[in-house]
Amino acid sequence: MKSKKLKRFTLMLLLLPLGVLFLGAGCEKEDVSQSVLNGKWILIGFGDDSTNEFTSEPNSEPKSSYVIFDNGRMVAYSVSNMVEDAKYVVDEERKIIFSTHGMKTLIGGDTEWGQQFLSLIIKIYEFEVKEDELKLYYESQKYMKLKKDTK
């Protein structure tokens, strides 16, 4: 009789870690990789979730403000300026943490739209991706919306 109880006890001790492993697997947080950002994203406008306002890029703009994310590196371009060699990491809550920023002027001045884009891109702290659209939050409830370049 004692031998039977000892065998059951030993079996329970062997199965306990497996049970914990299977139970814990269902409670894991979603794996968020910075690769979801990878690619070229073209600016289409600025929005505010608190007021539901959205301002599209003016027709007069050359549609040339965009950002490229590449596995922890970011480069953002406007008409004549760029933010280059910005490094970032993405945490499990889709927060973006930058480690460096650099600004390099290419030629001449910039458009008002381009200046706004570049001044805010270095302030982003959170993102949301839905299919081929990306929201980059730079302030509480304020974001810039970009569309994935599929060319």
Image (cartoon, helix red, strand yellow):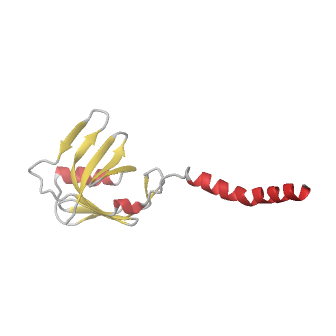
Residue 88 appears in the figure: no
Q: Which residue extends farthest top?
A: 51
Image-based side of 143 in relation to 25, left or right: left
Q: Is residue 38 above or below residue 93?
A: below
Q: Which residue extends farthest right?
A: 2
Q: Which residue extends farthest left?
A: 60
Location of residue 106 in the rendering, given as x and y in whole percent from the top left corner: 21, 66
Q: Residue at x 22, y 63 (%)?
A: 150
Q: Looking at the image, which is closer to me, 73 or 41?
A: 41
Q: Looking at the image, which is closer to me, 109 or 63?
A: 63
Location of residue 13 in the rendering, given as x and y in whole percent from the top left corner: 77, 58
Image-based side of 120 in relation to 150, left or right: right
Which image quadrant: the C terminus? bottom left
Image-based side of 64 in relation to 128, left or right: left
Which image quadrant: the N terminus? bottom right
Q: Residue at x 51, y 51 (%)?
A: 29
Location of residue 56 in the rendering, given as x and y in whole percent from the top left corner: 17, 45
